[in-house]
Image: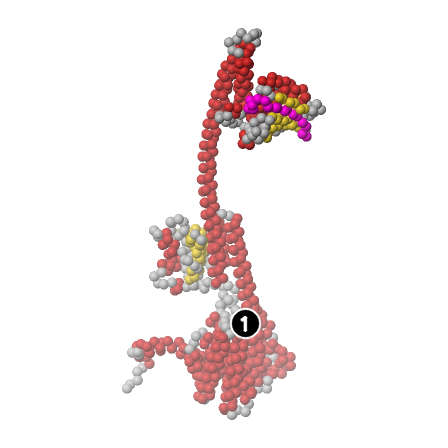
Amino acid sequence: MPRRPLSDFPLMLIYLPKSLRRRLVTALPSLALAIALGLCTALAYGMLGRGQQWLSLGLGQGMALALWWQGTNIIALALGLTIAPMVVQGDPPLALALGMISTAVVLMAGRGLKMLEFSPQGQRLQDGMVFLLAGVGLGATLTAIAALLLSLWQGDGRIWWTGSLAWLGSATGILLAAPLLFKLRYGRWSWPWSARMERLQLVEALVCAGLLLMLAWLIFAGDDLIPLADRGAIYTQWLEYLPFPIVVWASIRFPIWGGILSTSGLALLAITATVQGNGSFNVQSADQSGAMILLQMFFLVLGTTSLLLSVAVRERRRTEEQLRGSWERERLLAEVALRVRQSLHLGTIFQTTVTEVRHLLQTDRVYIALLQGNSPLAVVAESCGPAYKTSLNSQIAASPNPEEMIVKTIPTEAMVVHHPDQLPKGDPLRRSFLRYQVKSLLAIPLATLDGRLGMIVVHHCQQPRHWQKAEVRLLEQLATQVAIAIQQAQLYQRVQTLNTNLEKQVGERTAQLEDKMVELQDLQQMKALFVQAISHDLRTSVMGLLMVLKNLSTTEGEALTLPRHLLDSLIRSGDRQLTLLNALCEEQTAECRPLQLAPQALPLQPFLQQICHQWRSACEQHQVVLNLKCDETLSPLQGDPHYIKQVFDNLLGNALNHNPPGITLTLAAQLEGNMVRFTLSDNGKGMAKDQCEHLFRLYLRNRHNQRLTGIGLGCYQSRQIVEAHGGHIGVTSSPGQGSHFWFTLPLAV
């Protein structure tokens, strides 16, 4: 059967079964990596020579460990680790043994790294320690054990020397190769050619690299300039440590890239020079094998120091960045909370929030969208980069059903989209991503107990971005503050509406009360006119009747059509009616203006005797005994004699008119501080307690009691007179036990 040309190989793949073709296509990347690994290891073998197989094997183990961590098939790695020794040494059994040893080392060391939670990004000092312990230490130890067993199998007498060389070569190779590949795969570039580096850092990096290259060339490749015989002991013992400060400088100032690249570059130059027979290590050793041992020991110490120092500095910087970010988040939260407390203007709060969030997260667009009644979700505040389209005042979505609109447009929890590929193909959000050039999205709902109000949205437009948990928590806390601000503004608006309605109601009620007061004033004025007119007319008729009766009473003899005692009774009744009418007129006048007193000093004894004398005749007619008890040494009284006499007349008249004949009245006066206390006591029928409480107020007396009919005007007028003088008046009484009236008036100054 004729052989097909190589150009027909793609056509041959088409006729293979689909499952086999899929497996072959899937295996091609792993096969390519295996070939690349084998070529790199073979290159190391070729450059170092057959005597440095353990260092070459260590470099292959380091590369394979990094590739295995990235997910490369272990079978492909085993194939690559076996190809190199087989090609270089030409001993298939030995090559197979070395390949199996390296594969076992990679597998065991990788498992150890995963068990100890190693992170290839090198963010923690723990990662550096774990890599040195499980990656370098465990891998080199396993290689040394395998080398011991291989030496026993081959019958080599220097088994411990072989084991030591295997441990040293494997440790140095893994330490030089694995960190570089880890950083290439998982690291973030921030070297001088990156836009993130400032100009001074660029100059510093170039100076550091130049010094390192100059010292490396001087120490390891400068034999033409300085003869070996003229260097002396100082050069051979200490000069190779001159690059140490430069490597430390690079590790501190540019972690982790600075430490890895400076160590790897220095190692490449040193190994090349040492293999060619140049450099300080060849001067210190009698042969090249010894020089390579010194070189491996040197770079094992240098690489360990550089790695631990870089990781420690990176962890410290990471901690500082976290603290700075935490401080910035707390500051932003405090500022928003302060604005919420100090201001009820939502526009200011919203704009401050979006501006500060965009500055803190270093993103391209931040906006706040709110539901406003039944209107669509609208953007009310935005902070956007100048290179991107604004979404301010745009509507997110519209729906005739508000509840449906809320469900479709506002998430119930944080929506995190790291890459547009996360969204389904038919998702409407994809169109928004294309329209506004969005690569990553973070949306947090604004919600209260009453429901969802809107959302805070962050867009990253330059490239896809992985949102951190701290950033999500920050937006959630800010969303809580903004929701509180919205709720406070709504409550304030409700309070303002209620205040407006209340002011309107108060104004209407005040107008009604003013109208009512005007109406009452008109009624009061009409009442005053009515009372004045009635009292005037009644006084005129009563005074005319009294004049006639008094003229008749002055007629001598009994030649009258009426008996004399009946005439006297009519005169007394007329006087009583005239007194009541005068009191009614005075009371009506007192409602409009206060009493006009004319106080003067009144001697008590003569004043009281005069009152008793005037009432003696009336008391005799009612068969009443009137007694006076007054100390002659009492000081004069300060008061208006007309009004004070009216008080005594009212009280004495009430006592005579409202008690049966035959009682005893006692009028007394005694000193009580700077006041004089007057008492009028009787042993009449007395009064109930409720009558005593209303006696000095305007009231209608009981119409069913003949002795208590009419208006209680006299006692009311007496209270006004006494209080106008600065005193007090009262009564104590019990039914069947008589009454005890009292009032106080001031002494003359």
The quadrant in which residue 74 appears is bottom left
**Residue 271 position (above or below residue 615):** below
Q: Does the magenta stretch include residue 92?
A: no
Answer whether residue 744 is visible to the viewer in this image: yes
* Residue at left offset 62%, top offset 25%: 680
* Residue at left offset 53%, top offset 11%: 563
Q: How many other residues sit within 10 Å of disc 1, few (<14), some (14-19) or many (≥20)?
A: some
Q: Mark 1 points at which residue?
A: 126
Q: Does the magenta stretch include residue 672?
A: yes
**Residue 613 position (above or below residue 687):** above
Image spot of residue 710 (x, y percent): 51, 23
Give the colour scheme of this rendering: secondary structure
Q: In which quarter of the image is the C terminus?
A: top right
The quadrant in which residue 555 appears is top right
Image spot of residue 15 (x, y percent): 29, 78
Q: In which quarter of the image is the N terminus?
A: bottom left
* Residue at left offset 42%, top offset 54%: 452
Residue reaching furthest right?
A: 633
Residue reaching furthest front?
A: 662
Image spot of residue 469 (x, y percent): 48, 63
The quadrant in which residue 234 appears is bottom right
Judging depth in this view, the residue of 679 and 405 nearest the camera is 679
Image spot of residue 52 (x, y percent): 52, 84
Q: Give the range drawn in magenta.
A: 657-673
Residue reaching furthest left?
A: 1
Q: What element carries label 1?
A: helix
